[in-house]
Image (cartoon, rainbow, N blue to C red):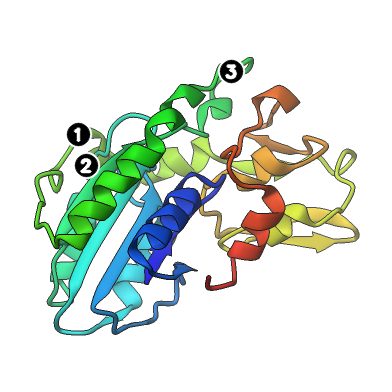
Amino acid sequence: MIYYFSGTGNSWHVARLLAKALGERTAPVDPAGTELTEALTGLVFPVYFGEIPRPVRSFLERSRFAPEGYFFSVGTCGSTIGSSLQTVDALLRAKGRQLDYGARLAMVANSTPAARSHIHYAVEKLDGEAAAVKAIATAVWDRVEDRSLCRSSLMGSLFRTAPGQAFQRWFFKLSVLPERCTGCGLCVGLCPAANISLASGKAVHGQNCAECLACLHACPVQAVTVRGREILPEDQYHHPGVTWDELKKARTLQE
């Protein structure tokens, strides 16, 4: 089984390609944890400020692991892998397992609208996705053991601290312009943390944001803001190989 956490489709697309190459199924991570009994387990996630997303951490902390098996993980990132794979390895070791193979895959960063507008996304990075996934799948088939990317980073260490976490929550603070929201419910279905609901026909964010920014990028009327910043339609992003409807279905279904 290959588990994934994905906001705008990068990690889900990678997980699907890996599953096809390896003859495996995919499933979204469950922050409440699950029973991991497979001989082969994969985990694909985006890197946030050099670390793993909070739902991924919760998934690893609360899941129950078979004593043996091969565990690999892929971090998708705009630039650095940070301390994310080191964190995955540490959480696995706390359960009597270890990360057998870790890989980095450069993708398009979806966090840019939190800082600026009129973005030129580096979609050319996606040109190498298929070849990179093939190489990862080959390594997994051969049960390669490589933890060379399990290392600490200044960014990862910083954003594990309480001030770092507070900054991250502030930087990705999402809210909704009620006068613009049409109550279509797309953001509700897309939210991997079940943090968005409809109240009086308008979307409302709760206190459990995963900071994946799916709602920001998907809103068809740009009603979701980040720190009050409105996003331009041309600055909204999702992986070109997936649709929002596919991502919404993928939140709850195994494939």
Q: Are marks 2 and 1 in contact (CB under 8 Å)?
A: yes
Vertical arrangement, residue 38 with respect to residue 135, above or below = below
Where is residue 175 drawn, in percent x and y? 69, 43
Closer to the eye: label 1 or 3: 3
Question: Between 238 and 124, which is closer to the camera in this rendering?
Answer: 124
Instruction: Name the element at disc 1.
Output: helix
Circle 2: residue type: Ser
* Mark 2 crowd level (few <14, some 14–19, many ≥20, 10 Å Cα): some
Under tag 3, what secondary structure?
A: loop
**Relative horizontal placement of residue 9, taking residue 46 as reference (left or right):** right
Which residue: 80% across, 57% down? 185
Q: Is residue 134 left or right of residue 198?
A: left
Percent position (x, y) of residue 21?
A: 36, 58
Q: Which residue lies under the disc numbered 2?
A: 157
Residue lying at 22% horizontally and 44% vertically, measured from the top left: 83
Marker count (numbered): 3
> Of callouts 1 and 3, which one flags the residue occurring earlier in the amino acid sequence?
3
Residue in view at x 77 percent, y 35 percent: 222
Q: Position of residue 193 (x, y in %)?
A: 56, 62
Tell me how far mark 2 sits from mark 3, CA to CA: 28 Å
Across and down, in percent, residue 138 comes to 23, 53
Label 3, on which residue?
119
Q: Which mark is residue 52?
A: none
Compared with 2, 222 (above or below) is: above
Q: Residue under label 1, please give it.
A: 154
**Label 2 to label 1: alpha-carbon separation:** 5 Å
227 or 86, nearer to the observer: 86
